[in-house]
Image (tube, helix red, strand yellow):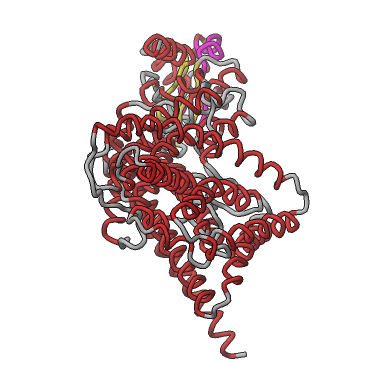
Amino acid sequence: MLPCIISYLVSLQREEMVKRIHNIIKRLILYVHDNLSPRHFFILSSIIVGLSSGLAAIFLKYFVHSIETLVTYYSHNYEEFFLFTLFPIIGIGLTVFYIHRFLHGNFKKGSAEIVYAITKKSSVLPSSQMYTNLITSALTVGFGGSTGLESPMVSTGAAIGSNYGRVYGLSYKEKTILLACGAAAGISAAFNAPIAGVLFAVEVLLTDVSASAFIPLIIAAASGALLSKIILSEGVILSFALQQPFNYHNVPFYIALGILTGFMALYYTRTFEWIDAKIKSIRNIWVRVISGGLMLSVLLLIFPPLFGEGYETIKTLSDLHPSELAQNSLIQRFISSDYTLLIFLGCLAFLKCVAAALTIGSGGNGGSFGPSLFMGAYLGFVFARIINMLGLSYIPETNFTLVAMAGMLSGVFYAPLTAIFLIAEITGGYELMIPLMLVSAISLTVVNYFEPLSMEAKKLSNKLKSPVEDRDKTLLNRLDLTELIETNFSTIHPEATLQELVKVISNSKRNIFPVLSNEELKGLVFLDNVRNIIFKHDQYDKVFVQDLMTTPQAVIHANENLHSILKKFDETNQWNLPVVENNKYLGFVSKSSILTKYREELMRSA
């Protein structure tokens, strides 16, 4: 009994300590917020969000790497390889249990949900998303689920940025940029690729971005990459060394590879969506877990490289040791020649999307980023090896492996710049820039001909009438509320007399008078409402402002987005509404000034 009591007291002390640390950090940031200019505080915020998101991504990488190491060691050490194929079912089952037991089934994932939050929820993401994606993806991928970690990293980073902005009362525009900063830092830390992180945020999340947003995005991505450089080891991070430079004589083969990766990206999109829909049509969640998990296990028995993210197998390919990938496969004894090995590798390229769809459709958490890179790598290697075996030419297999990864990423995510610079950064240079640009552009052109929208954009189309082209709201979101606040309104105290009010009215050009006490808004006096009484001199010392003021029909908050503000104007039928921040009066915003600025922005973007 005593040990239980002691343990309980210790846990309480730890919880209390965590709360104290959290409060200290919050007070420190609030102190800095009050003593820095808004611009400098926002730059500092991008650093904090970048470091936090980077740490979350690094933690997830190491945690998954540790689980995979234990799982692999256990199954191989005891020579019970069939156990190796059962672990993904366990991981998916634990993920589903966690989501339904602790989150009550309320779990959002994927970049489509982030863009939806930006467009329809004022860039507000639930605070639980800062850790739920870490836990669920670690269980799924760590135990061998055949999907990627990048989407959960992006969701986690975005949630960190969103909630930071919400807690410290930042505007919609600032919250949106910090949300993107978190996502950029997550990608940046995962690959030690800051430019790719920035471009991912711009291409995938931000439908409209101004030049001023790039500075915090760059700072956040650099912060994440710096942590990755310091903490992550070479065994965890995906990196390659180029063995041969680009040769312009190989351009025709790169063009052919671009076409192939485009059709492979199309195959990925349609196959993934079809399998995912079929699996999710099973109503009973546990039947779905078992059926999808068993099909995944069969694939892993025959094709072990499909286990987990598969980045280690990509390194094996790039090192030109493909025969090692067939080890522990049920069909290993049949892979006795270069031709059968190529068939094996080709099957891996085509089956990765099947494994990923089974993993996610069964209830696991992950994304398409990793599977896209995996499929591209295997497709590029097989393509180059076939060309070399046929004697058509000699082309560098490692280079084609890497360039095809960019082609697949570009075709699946419709993000060619992210794909180009990601591969450039993980190879340590820009030697392959020309083939990367060629293959990425051709791949996107091919897949875009058949599918106008990416998978994530199609998911959004189920929620939004116009997923990306919500032009009116996008233009409104560009406007800065602080630039629209008018402060030339004469204020008065609620205990002031009618005589004092008359003096204020005579010196003012406005017909609205905010009533303030200790800078807090208590009410409003409208000239039209007091026009009759101001000429009654006998009432000057008997009537007070608090008797004449009225409660405003609506109040605008400093961090409110313009779309919500316009709704308040329409609901109240007012043309001027007061603006407050933490109950402190800031000024007024007029409906006409918003519409004028909107028209200017519309003309500028036309």
Foreground of the two, 273 or 331: 331
Tell me the quadrant of the picture where the C terminus can be found.
Answer: top left
Left-right relation of 529 to 241? right
Residue pictured at 41% horizontal, 27% vertical: 442
Residue at 51% in and 18% down: 472
Work out which residue is located at the far right of the displayed protein and give it. Answer: 283
Asked whether residue 360 appears in the rendered view, the answer is yes
Q: Is residue 522 magenta?
A: yes
Read off the magenta span: 514-534
Is residue 597 positioned above or below 223 on the image?
above
Residue drawn at the location 38% of the way across and 41% of the way down: 387
Quadrant of the snapshot with the N terminus: bottom right
Q: Is 523 situated left or right of 396 in this image?
A: right
Residue 4 included in the magenta stretch of the image: no
> Closer to the camera, 58 or 121?
58
Residue most extreme to the bottom: 2
